[in-house]
Every structure is written in C-alpha cells, then in structure tokens.
Image: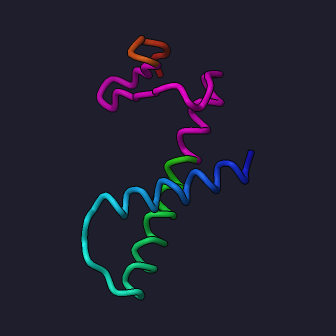
Amino acid sequence: MEKVAELEIRHMAFMRLQDMIIQFDGASYKELLKEFQDFEADSCNFWRGVARRISVPYEWPIRIDHANGTIYVGGHDLYEG
C-alpha cells in the first residue's frame, strides 16, 4: 500500500506541474517537482488518516467544514467533531 501511495503522489505531482503550462529550466523544474511531491505526500498522509479514522475507503470524497467541524463523505453529513 505504501508503494501505491508513493506512486500516486508522484503521479499527482507530475500532473499538477504539467497543468501549470510554465516554461522551466532543468534545475527549477526539479526543485518545483520536489515541492509538489512533498505537498502531495503531506496531503495523502492527512486524508488517509482521516479516512482511516472515520472508517471509509480513502477513495471516497471527503470534505471537512473548517468553520463547523463537520465531516462530509460523498456529500453526506457523517461526523461532527
């Protein structure tokens, strides 16, 4: 599972970087890619932890209402923290 998560992180980082449509030199591209991979890793770890805590599959859409603390899964109110 960790290897799958690592591959997904790398894939999403590449995709986000390509979506930016910006010209880079080799050094700045590698530096920015590393930043994107770090962000994707942090994001993945956070959302995997949330999914595990509320016992839902990681692939389900999860949204947290920052103002009220309510967690929505697939558009449904699931948990109030």
Quadrant position of residue 57: top right
Quarter placement of the N terminus: top right
Residue 3 image position (x, y, % from top left): 72, 53
Is 13 left or right of 22, judged from the image as shown? right
Viewer-nearest residue: 76 or 26: 26
Please provide the residue range marked out in magenta. 45-73
Count of numbered tags:
0
Here the colouring is: rainbow
Q: Residue at x 50, y 63 (%)?
A: 37
Q: Residue at x 39, y 79 (%)?
A: 29
Residue 81 image position (x, y, % from top left): 47, 22
Residue 8 image position (x, y, % from top left): 58, 51
Is 4 left or right of 28, judged from the image as shown? right
Residue 48 image position (x, y, % from top left): 60, 38
Is 53 left or right of 29, judged from the image as shown? right
Whether residue 72 is in magenta: the answer is yes
Q: Residue at x 65, y 30 (%)?
A: 52
Residue 39, compared with residue 26, is above or below; it is above
Quadrant position of residue 26: bottom left
Whether residue 57 is in magenta: the answer is yes
Viewer-nearest residue: 45 or 19: 19
Residue 73, compared with residue 45, is above or below; it is above
Viewer-nearest residue: 67 or 55: 55
Q: Residue at x 44, y 18 (%)?
A: 74
